[in-house]
Amino acid sequence: MNWTVDVPIDQLPELPPLPADLRERLDAALAKPAAQQPSWPANQAAAMRTVLESVPPITVPAEIQRLQRQLAQVARGEAFLLQGGDCAETFADNTEPHIRANIRALLQMAVVLTYGASMPVVKLARIAGQYAKPRSSDTDALGLKSYRGDMVNGFAPDATLREHDPSRLVRAYANASAAMNLVRALTGSGMASLALVHDWNREFVRTSPAGPGTRRWPARSIVV
């Protein structure tokens, strides 16, 4: 599926300038040496960047601030951090069954860890944007440009598909937005209910020494 976003690229809106302190921090970060950069044309990349600056964000400040508070709890030893997901996501696997399965696996592990560690578990998923990956070499064994993730080039061993294409940034945005919205829908519609997660427990958990304890967990929701 060739996802894109409906933005009039020839008539992009004028954007307000960033706050001075944020602009300064961003410029300082961009000035640092950066390895593993795609070799795509700078003018094409700049055009795609302008498009991405014009579309709605994938997340909002309130969600970021909530994660910061939760990670602060982890740093203070008041919570446990559970991170999981695909090493690198692909556009082809950005489907409801795949995303649901990943979220379900994280919730299953979180229940066991909550019981074992006797503390809240902060769940951090590698999802909705993990479309790029570093490589130790610019070329692969076939002499083609290395696959650097769907955000940069194609996986198939074809010279044309392996060219670094900045338009994939917009496709990555569209896929990440869809994935993030599905995650919100799944976790906000009862999927994180502990009563439901009980039904998912795998056989080895039910029959393990900790099995009787898992059946005594209170039927409450897991904070996502």
Image: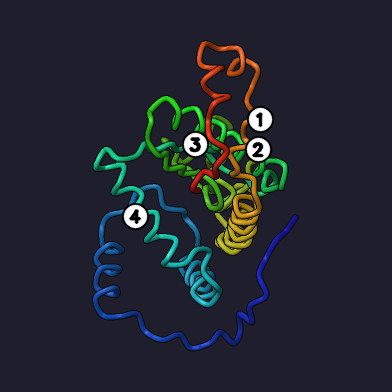
| Disc on the earlier residue, 4 or 3 | 4
Q: Is residue 23 left or right of residue 7?
A: left
Three-letter code for the amino acid on which mark 4 is drawn: Gln
Residue 20 visible here:
yes
- Residue beneath label 3, please? 84
- Residue beneath label 4, please? 68
- Using a 10 Å C-alpha cutoff, classify the residue at mark 3 as few (fewer than 14 neighbours), some (14 to 19) or many (20 or more): some
- Residue beneath label 1, please? 200
The quarter of the picture where the N terminus appears is bottom right
Q: Is residue 185 left or right of residue 143?
A: right
Mark in the foreground, 2 or 1: 2
Q: Secondary structure at mark 2?
A: helix
Residue 159 visible here:
no
| Disc on the earlier residue, 4 or 2 | 4
Mark in the foreground, 4 or 3: 4
Front residue of this view, candidates 210 and 40: 210
Q: Secondary structure at mark 3?
A: strand
| Disc on the earlier residue, 1 or 4 | 4
Three-letter code for the amino acid on which mark 1 is drawn: Trp
* Disc sitting over residue 214 in the figure: none
* Disc sitting over residue 196 in the figure: 2
Front residue of this view, candidates 2 and 34: 2
Distance between the Cα atoms at labels 3 and 1?
18 Å
Q: Name above or below for residue 90 compared with residue 7.
A: above
Label 2 close to label 1 by CB (< 8 Å): yes
Distance between the Cα atoms at labels 4 and 2?
28 Å
Q: Secondary structure at mark 1?
A: helix
| Disc on the earlier residue, 2 or 3 | 3
Distance between the Cα atoms at labels 2 and 3?
20 Å
